[in-house]
Image: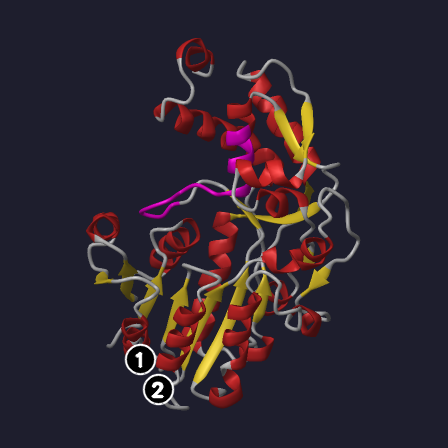
Amino acid sequence: MTSTKIFATGVTGYIGGDALYAITQAHPEFQWTCLVRNSDKGALIASQYPKAKLVYGTLDDTQLLEEEAKKANVVLKDPYTTDFASADHEAAATALCKGLAAHSPDDPGYLIHTSGTGLLLVDDIQANTYGWAASKIYDDWDGLVVVTSLPDDAPHRKVDKIVLNVSDDHSKSVKTAIVSPPTIYGKGRGPGNQRGHQVYELSRCTIEKKEGLKVGQGENFWPNVHVYDLSDCYLKLVEAAVKGEENVTWNKEGYYFTENGEHVWGEIAHRVAMEVYGLGLIPSNDVRSIDEDEANKLTPKGAALWGANSRCKAVRARKLLGWTPKERSLEDELPDIVTSEVQRLKLSGVIEGHAAKVAG
């Protein structure tokens, strides 16, 4: 029997690598073709997934992407690609959609694209307000039209529009879904990067600057999800594509937030400072307020990532996929996040001498 064929980008990254792990654990029979930039990245994948086919290139190689999208197929006549790499690469998204459009209506192609709840930062970015709480909470069910109609200058919006609009001309031959993750935490299980970003960067900066840090008042909200739970959403969407489940929505209604609660960034900053202080790496657990310029110097787009509001509810995945997050909370994960950053900085020589001994 011909096996399900998947073409994937970004599988040496944090999100894509963990999703690859989760899907292959559940379905070892699936055949993977993975886009990789170079032989070093290819070796990482080959060591963990020796049966995976590797194609070398980047997201700029649009002809390659188009051809691989055309070739992807599944036994139940549901071929699809999974784009984990860049939420903002317009040419790559266009090429993938063009390749999938070559499929016939009785053998449609499925595209599962990764966006992000950074999309929802648009109001704060436009108003240049950081560190203040916002009451507006988006959802992907009753409020779907609002989410899919945000201004074009919202983060990720241009590529979201490409994916959403492909069904205007190819609704029967292409089925798309957009997965929109929030703050992601937990150690990944993929062959490459296993480190999250926002909280990990905040921990790094707290250690390196030797003080707790928050943007402005630190009252702003973000949703969060454990990377294992996020991967379970990808798995459920892939299975729905393979099975052709009619209750799962695609195209204009194929937008899926993934959250398991939310956090206030100022509170997370205090918790991180407490953890780092407990390791003897900073002189106090005080948290200093920084402005957007300093935040952006500490990490790219730091003001938005730590200081703007991104609030949403993941209704669609729960209703239609039966997605039920079950991993431990961000707050419970924080000690391990801080410890992992300490170990990483020790290896890079940032933490030296007595501090390294104190940190273990």
The amino acid on which the numbered mark 1 sits, given as a three-letter code, is Lys
The amino acid on which the numbered mark 2 sits, given as a three-letter code, is Ala
* Residue occupied by mark 1: 70
Per the image, label 1 sits on a secondary structure element best described as: helix
Asked whether the residues under the numbered discs 1 and 2 touch, taking CB atoms below 8 Å apart as contact, a structural biologist would say yes
Q: Is residue 74 visible?
A: no
* Residue occupied by mark 2: 102
For the residue pair 179 and 200, the one nearer the viewer reads as: 200
On the rendered image, what quadrant is the N terminus found in? bottom left
For the residue pair 259 and 70, the one nearer the viewer reads as: 70
- From the viewer's perspective, tell me whether residue 245 is left or right of residue 5: right
- Say which residue appears at 36% left-offset and 26% top-offset: 348
Per the image, label 2 sits on a secondary structure element best described as: loop
Residue at the extreme right: 135
Question: Residue 27 lies in magenta, yes or no?
Answer: no
Q: Is residue 161 visible?
A: yes
